[in-house]
Image (cartoon, grey):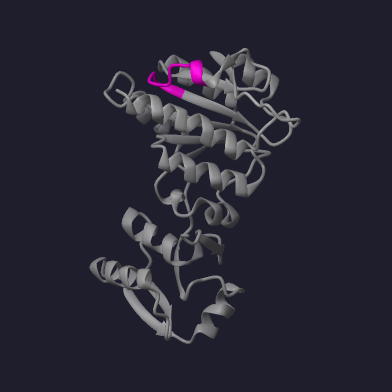
Amino acid sequence: MKKKTAARSSSANQELLYGVNPLLEALRAGERIPAEIVVAEGARDERLRELIELARTRNVTVKRVPRASIDRAIGNTHHQGVMARVAAARYADVDDLVSSIAKRVGSESEPLVVVLDGVEDPRNLGAILRTAECAGVDGVFVPERRAAGLTDAVAKAAAGAVEHVPVARATNLSRLIEELKERNVWVIGTVANASMSYTEWDWTRPSAVVLGGEGAGLHRLVSEHCDVLVSIPVRGKIQSLNVSVAAGIVLYEALRQRSRN
């Protein structure tokens, strides 16, 4: 099993990124290239060799240090023997992201977008970003307030996805939804009591799936602005799914439908 991403902020403008997979993703993405990678003396992980080779092709210095010094810098031992200081994750500009999504409407690869209405658990947000990246999502929108942001815990759960999926913060989700609709993107909200199943929607269209936060689900105004509401059928006594699980189910239905074309 692959290790998950782990990151810890060290200043307002930089953070410590640690773990083989997150550093590989940072180097591959090319947007947050570290000046130096620090590797624990004696570390022999096979993927660590791949990381070191990639770092050298990117002209990144690789320095060997005692493992204890990495432990102290990070504050734990879950680093796989490697760390680096990189620029902190940046949010995409919301207007730029909307514009880039709109340009793909009518193309062979219609846009697929995620809008999150108040997801507060960083682990849920990270898991959603990881699934979104794997499913080929073009962008994720989160509220500016009362919601999880791109924190260290999110980076840990996202396992490198923050390097690839643009995330933008919207001041008003209802206004954002209307703007997406004006750009010919269908907006589909997920609620427990919707009469339409998520499998009945044609996900080959340009689509933005809106997922509600833990417990409360979609806010009333947000749901009212959606083009259509869909549900995920449940058969047990618990009537709702974890939001990150729901995201995976819906996004992979979209991917399944799109893969047929």
Asked if residue 30 can be seen in this view, the reply is: no
Q: At which x and y percent is residue 153?
A: 60, 55
Relative horizontal placement of residue 124, taking residue 38 as reference (left or right): right
Relative horizontal placement of residue 87, taking residue 221 as reference (left or right): left
Q: Is the magenta stretch mostly helix, strand or loop?
A: loop
Residue name at image x 61 percent, y 44 percent: 124
Span highlighted in magenta in the image: 199-207
Q: At which x and y percent is residue 12?
A: 55, 60
Q: Which of 250 and 54 is in front in this view?
A: 250
Residue name at image x 66 percent, y 18 percent: 221
Indicate whether 55 appears above or below 198.
below
Q: How many labels does the image show?
A: 0
Indicate whether 255 appears above or below 8.
above
Residue name at image x 52 percent, y 17 percent: 178
Which quarter shows the C terminus?
A: top left
Quarter of the rendering containing residue 75: bottom right
Q: Nearer the viewer, residue 253 or 141?
A: 253
Q: At which x and y percent is residue 39?
A: 42, 78
